[in-house]
Amino acid sequence: MRASIRRAIQATWAATRLMVILTVLLGVAYPLAMTGFAQVVFPGRANGSVVKNASGAVVGSSLIGQSFQDADGNPLPQYFQPRPSAVDYDAGTSGGSNQGPESTVLIAAIQARRAEVAAFNGVDPSQVPVDAVTASGSGLDPDISPAYAAIQINRVAAARGMTVDAVTALVKKFTKGPDLGYIGEWRVNVVQLNLALDEQ
């Protein structure tokens, strides 16, 4: 009886020591090491990919889209407009509309958005790209396609009193290719682009 109790105590003590060691290693040392590594190698990403204005104030994140509308919900002509968002770019409620491609509600919304985007940018509805009328799965996408950016250049240039060439140059500056050359699509970060326009 005493031998079995002794074995149980030894096993419990061994398990306790192992738990403490693994807690220190995997719950403290490893997270601290990864945090330090990220701060050295990827400081911007490790701190949320924040975007700051010319005065150094944080105005957002390059990973989360923003709405560029007035108080009544109308798009501001001096800014490039992002993709639609099912959650109004609220990172706390990230998600899509959950409407399928055969949803009559979604089809009607896409048709209405296409007409609005075309009228707002002064282009034919056939020139409106898909990402201008469909929300991303997260509702937080900060990027648009170069095609969507292209149909907005003339409007933004006119609203800001800039030349089309100057606005086009900024769009090119904030256009990124696929990661590693093949992962993802060509894209333009709307948050960074609009901030650069404000700083012109």
Image (spheres, rainbow, N blue to C red):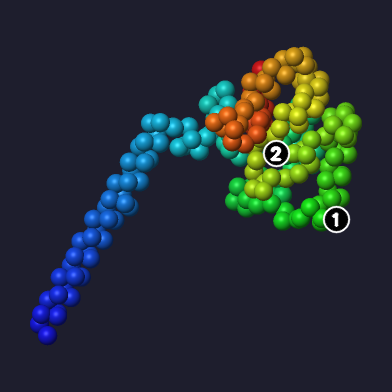
**Residue 132 x/y as whole percent:** 77, 38
Does 108 sit left or right of 164 as displayed? Answer: right
Residue 6: percent from left, percent from top? 12, 76
Q: Looking at the picture, which amino acid does disc 2 mark?
A: Ser
The residue under label 2 is 67
Relative to residue 54, is residue 126 depicted above or below?
below
Q: Earlier in the sequence, mark 1 or mark 2?
A: 2
Write the residue at 66% across / 17% down.
Answer: 200
**Foreground of the two, 157 or 33:** 33
Disc 2 secondary structure class: loop
Disc 1: CA contacts within 10 A as few (<14), some (14-19) or many (>=20): few
One can see residue 125 in this view:
yes
Q: Relative to 133, is 59 above or below?
A: above
Q: Quadrant of the N terminus?
A: bottom left
Checking the image for residue 104, the label placed there is 1
Residue 58: tell me if it is visible. Answer: no
